Image: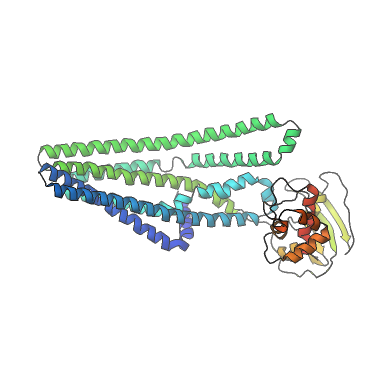
């Protein structure tokens, strides 16, 4: 428990430190709002007592206008606080999303083979979104509501020590109930988010294979699996909601006890002529004001529970490290290179090796065609050469340089690869070719497209290089492959 709290606190400090100025402004706005909230019940007490004592219309009007002005000021500060908190929350979560995305992109291919894109989207976006309120409001609202709670109790003690003591006991009881309930929903929330991730992964896989599913009549099976995933979300979500309802019911019961206590004490003191009617209303109003900080503290604790579940999953993702070690910078010679495999053994995970004691050498300028059945290792060769994987034994070299001794970036600069499934972006032809590198001139793009034989096709497009390529249409499979070749030519591996 303490370790989880420490982890949450460290994460909060790390991501809010760059925004300490906005966090400071947010604190000032919230504290000002708390001060105004404490003043208004005093005005109401004066208004009621003045009315009961036959106060003038001018006096009552002045109190009413002041009350309205303070209420409007409180609302304006609330809007400002929301604005600042949203800015802080989105800035922090966007930074976390970018760091998680970069971390995942740098992980080994086995990591991506074991997880679907939908699951990673839920990790990088869904879990991080759950932290938005934690980043933007948690500390400020916990501190602010704590001060509001203390201010109300101090003012109640100032009015009558018996009422103050009773409300203090009520507050301690409410805090005890909240503390008992604070960790109840963490495992349920974590289970619900895990079910969400599984559903997203399932949908991504099935949507990407929609052609095969339709062609082979797999629609009924897919729908059955979809309903199973949805049922799992329903079951886990219902359990999480029931736990939250239990916490809410406990809080409401405590508040009902507090209201009854405030009214009973107020009536008792009023009957003894020790307080005025306005003061009785003040007791009840301040007791109602205790509800706001206690409810918000409860909500912040729920956010902490949700955040704890998300933080645990995010930390689990961040603890995954790459098993491939970058080289120490051995140089790869310029120009055409000899490709060599020496006694290479490689298999995916714990499966039987796909390549066993493979050795060959391909001289510069030579072309090698590979024929083999599905799963015989043809694609695996290119992945090893691109150093997406490392062999279990043996060496792969370019000229005399072992790939594991060179920087990965240098290896991938000198090796070009065109996959069977070409990924085109919903962007212009220029951006699809250059990968959004603005330093590549149109003249160079034109020269490469002319070499590939795509320049006439490009000229036939409505906007040429600026024409947007639509996802899933507008480009044939052959044209997509040629665009991939153009990327390699621009990359110029040598």
| Residue 189 appears in view | yes
Q: Residue at x 79, y 57 (%)?
A: 485
Percent across and percent down for residue 414 are: 77, 64
Which of the colour schemes (rainbow, by chain, secondary structure, one colour) is used? rainbow
State whether residue 446 is above or below residue 104.
below
> In the image, 159: left or right of 18?
left
| Residue 153 appears in view | no
Q: Residue at x 46, y 59 (%)?
A: 16
Q: Residue at x 60, y 47 (%)?
A: 121
State whether residue 230 is above or below residue 393.
above
Q: Compare residues 158 and 475 and report the one nearer the observer.
A: 475
Percent across and percent down for residue 2 are: 44, 51
Percent across and percent down for residue 118 are: 62, 44
Q: Which of the image's four quarters has the C terminus?
A: bottom right
The part of the image, by quadrant, that contains residue 302 is top left
Q: Residue at x 67, y 60 (%)?
A: 436
The part of the image, by quadrant, that contains residue 200 is top right
Percent across and percent down for residue 186 are: 47, 42
């Amino acid at each position: 428990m303490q370790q989880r709290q420490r982890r949450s606190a460290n994460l909060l400090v790390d991501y809010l430190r760059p925004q300490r100025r906005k966090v400071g402004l947010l604190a000032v706005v919230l504290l000002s709002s708390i001060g105004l909230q404490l003043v208004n019940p005093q005005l109401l007490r004066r208004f009621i007592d003045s009315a009961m004592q036959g106060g003038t219309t001018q006096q009552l009007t002045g109190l009413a206008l002041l009350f309205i002005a303070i209420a409007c000021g409180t609302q304006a500060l609330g809007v400002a606080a929301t604005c600042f908190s949203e800015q802080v929350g989105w800035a922090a979560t966007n930074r976390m999303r970018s760091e998680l995305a970069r971390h995942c992109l740098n992980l080994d291919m086995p990591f991506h083979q074991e997880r679907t894109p939908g699951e990673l989207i839920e990790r990088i976006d869904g879990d991080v979104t759950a932290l938005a309120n934690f980043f933007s409001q948690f500390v400020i609202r916990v501190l602010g509501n704590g001060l509001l709670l203390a201010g109300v109790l101090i003012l109640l003690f100032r009015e009558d020590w018996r009422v103050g003591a009773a409300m203090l006991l009520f507050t301690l009881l409410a805090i005890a109930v909240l503390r008992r309930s604070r960790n109840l929903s963490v495992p349920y929330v974590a289970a619900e988010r895990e079910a969400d991730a599984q559903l997203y992964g399932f949908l991504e896989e099935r949507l990407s294979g929609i052609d095969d599913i339709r062609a082979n009549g797999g629609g009924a099976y897919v729908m059955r699996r979809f309903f199973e995933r949805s049922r799992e979300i329903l079951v886990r979500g219902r359990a999480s909601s029931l736990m939250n309802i239990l916490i809410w019911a406990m809080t409401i019961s405590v508040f009902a006890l507090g209201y009854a206590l405030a009214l009973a004490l107020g009536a008792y003191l009023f009957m003894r002529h020790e307080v005025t009617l306005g003061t009785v209303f003040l007791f009840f109003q301040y007791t109602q004001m205790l509800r706001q900080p206690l409810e918000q503290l409860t909500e912040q604790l729920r956010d902490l529970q949700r955040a704890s579940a998300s933080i645990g999953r995010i930390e689990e993702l961040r603890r995954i490290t790459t098993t491939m070690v970058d080289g120490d910078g051995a140089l790869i010679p310029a120009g055409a290179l000899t490709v060599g495999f020496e006694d290479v053994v490689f298999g995916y995970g714990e499966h039987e090796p796909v390549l066993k004691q493979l050795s060959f050498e391909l001289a510069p300028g030579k072309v090698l065609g590979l024929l083999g059945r599905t799963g015989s290792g043809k694609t695996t060769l290119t992945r090893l050469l691109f150093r997406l994987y490392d062999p279990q034994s043996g060496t792969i070299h370019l000229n005399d340089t072992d790939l594991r001794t060179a920087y990965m970036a240098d290896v991938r600069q000198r090796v070009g690869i065109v996959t069977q499934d070409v990924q085109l972006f919903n962007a212009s032809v220029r951006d699809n070719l250059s990968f959004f590198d603005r330093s590549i001139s149109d003249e160079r793009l034109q020269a490469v497209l002319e070499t590939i034989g795509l320049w006439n096709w490009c000229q036939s497009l409505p906007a040429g290089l600026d024409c947007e390529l639509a996802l899933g249409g507008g480009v044939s499979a052959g044209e997509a492959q040629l665009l991939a070749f153009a990327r390699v030519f621009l990359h110029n591996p040598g």
